[in-house]
């Protein structure tokens, strides 16, 4: 016997819109069913694919699986006071001036998923550490350091092409050695919800939020290289204060560089190519008189928001830097 239609009035589409926005990083227009559809049950909207899963509370109490892109478009257009109605085959969104009917599929066609239970609290500094390190990586690459961030226990590490390393402390007691995929990191920092705690199964990791939402990722099995062998031996006592104006000067001269290379001298930065030269005066830095260091502008600008102290002399391989709750290095040119 077909299920009789049920209709429920809701205060608006905000609840659905917030949930879809939270889940958007795992939703695709094409691909497997679980990548295109969201499951709605127990006042939760849930999405799952091979890499990422997420759940977000909603006000509406329905049980159905619906095309996520179609639902998002419907929520955008059916605004104002919203009434939802469901029958055996569809979910209808209706306002005073518009109605959209979306076909649904049974929930048992969706692979069930659940978050890892909370095992420890988590504070907002974790998300900020991820946010700070994320610009160093990208969504894909040939090496694990190209497309993931590393948990070092109480800190997060990002690495850019093996040339720039940034470590940011967040102070939470987390398992070391976890590699967080780019897409998980991007979804985490995009959320405006306040974090509450985390769960960990060995193969998956979940961040829980105070509003009941959760974000779960499949962890990368490949091991990161041991970056502590690079970071721990650094002589941070050689780092001298560096002003924000230095990095502003680097940005000013970047358009005149060839291959992003500049010569940093005690009181100026120089760029030179076959067709042009440019100079920019700077406050004195820790380079010997008449000395010069070749540096990569892209690498310098990556640490501009983080470095408050910098070692221009460096060791045979790298230049170290430090900042508030962070440290890192730039590999020398040449």
Image (cartoon, rainbow, N blue to C red):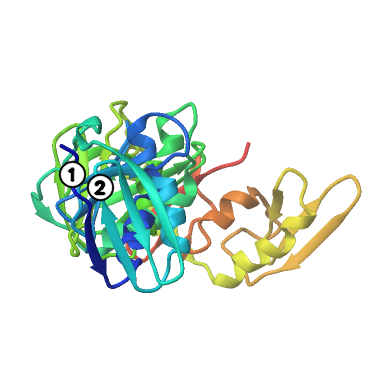
> Which residue position holds label 1?
3
Which residue: 26% across, 64% down? 124
Is 222 on the left-hand or right-hand side of 24?
A: left
Residue 289 sits above or below residue 198 on the image: below
Residue 318 at x, y percent in the picture = 50, 43
Foreground of the two, 269 or 60: 60
Foreground of the two, 6 or 27: 6
Which residue: 39% across, 73% down? 80
Quadrant into which the N terminus falls: top left
Which residue: 28% across, 64% down? 193
Residue 265 sits in quarter: bottom right
Is residue 238 at all visible to an observer of this figure? no
Residue 215 at x, y percent in the picture = 26, 49
Foreground of the two, 162 or 329: 162
Is 62 on the left-hand or right-hand side of 191?
A: left
**Mark 2 crowdedness (10 Å alpha carbons): few <14, some 14-19, many ≥20:** some
Tag 1's secondary structure? loop
Residue 279 sits above or below residue 315 on the image: below
Is residue 162 at all visible to an observer of this figure? yes
- Compute the Cα span from label 2 to label 1: 6 Å
Residue 9 at x, y percent in the picture = 25, 68
Quadrant into which the C terminus falls: top right
Q: Are marks 2 and 1 in contact (CB under 8 Å)?
A: yes
Q: Work out whether mark 2 precedes mark 1 in sequence or the reverse, and give the earlier one.
A: 1
The circle on residue 285 is none
Tag 2's secondary structure? loop
Residue 132 at x, y percent in the picture = 41, 57
- Figure disc tally: 2
The circle on residue 87 is 2
Foreground of the two, 64 or 112: 64
């Amino acid at each position: 016997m077909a299920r009789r239609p049920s209709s429920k009035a809701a205060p608006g589409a905000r609840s659905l819109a917030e949930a879809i926005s939270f889940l958007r990083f795992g939703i695709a227009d094409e691909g497997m069913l679980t990548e295109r559809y969201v499951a709605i049950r127990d006042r939760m909207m849930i999405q799952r694919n091979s890499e990422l899963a997420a759940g977000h509370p909603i006000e509406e109490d329905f049980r159905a699986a619906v095309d996520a892109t179609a639902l998002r478009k419907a929520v955008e257009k059916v605004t104002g006071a919203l009434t939802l109605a469901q029958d055996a085959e569809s979910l209808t969104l209706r306002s005073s001036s518009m109605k959209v009917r979306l076909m649904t599929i049974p929930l048992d066609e969706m692979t069930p998923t659940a978050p890892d239970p909370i095992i420890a609290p988590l504070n907002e500094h974790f998300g900020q550490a991820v946010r700070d390190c994320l610009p160093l990586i990208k969504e894909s690459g040939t090496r694990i350091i190209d497309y993931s961030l590393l948990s070092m226990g109480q800190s997060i590490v990002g690495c850019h092409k093996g040339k720039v390393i940034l470590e940011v402390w967040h102070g939470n007691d987390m398992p070391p050695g976890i590699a967080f995929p780019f897409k998980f990191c991007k979804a985490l920092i995009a959320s405006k919800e306040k974090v509450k705690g985390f769960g960990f199964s060995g193969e998956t990791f979940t961040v829980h939020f105070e509003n009941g939402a959760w974000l779960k990722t499949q962890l990368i099995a490949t091991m990161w290289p041991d970056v502590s062998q690079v970071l721990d031996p650094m002589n941070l006592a050689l780092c001298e204060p560096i002003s924000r104006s230095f990095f502003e000067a680097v940005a000013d001269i970047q358009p005149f560089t060839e291959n992003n290379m500049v010569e940093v001298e005690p009181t100026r930065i120089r760029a030179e190519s076959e067709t042009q030269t440019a100079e920019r005066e700077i406050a004195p830095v820790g380079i010997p008189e008449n000395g010069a260091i070749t540096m990569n502008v892209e690498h310098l600008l990556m640490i501009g928001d983080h470095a408050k102290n910098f070692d221009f002399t460096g060791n045979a391989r790298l230049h170290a830097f430090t900042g508030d709750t962070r440290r890192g290095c730039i590999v020398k040119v040449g």
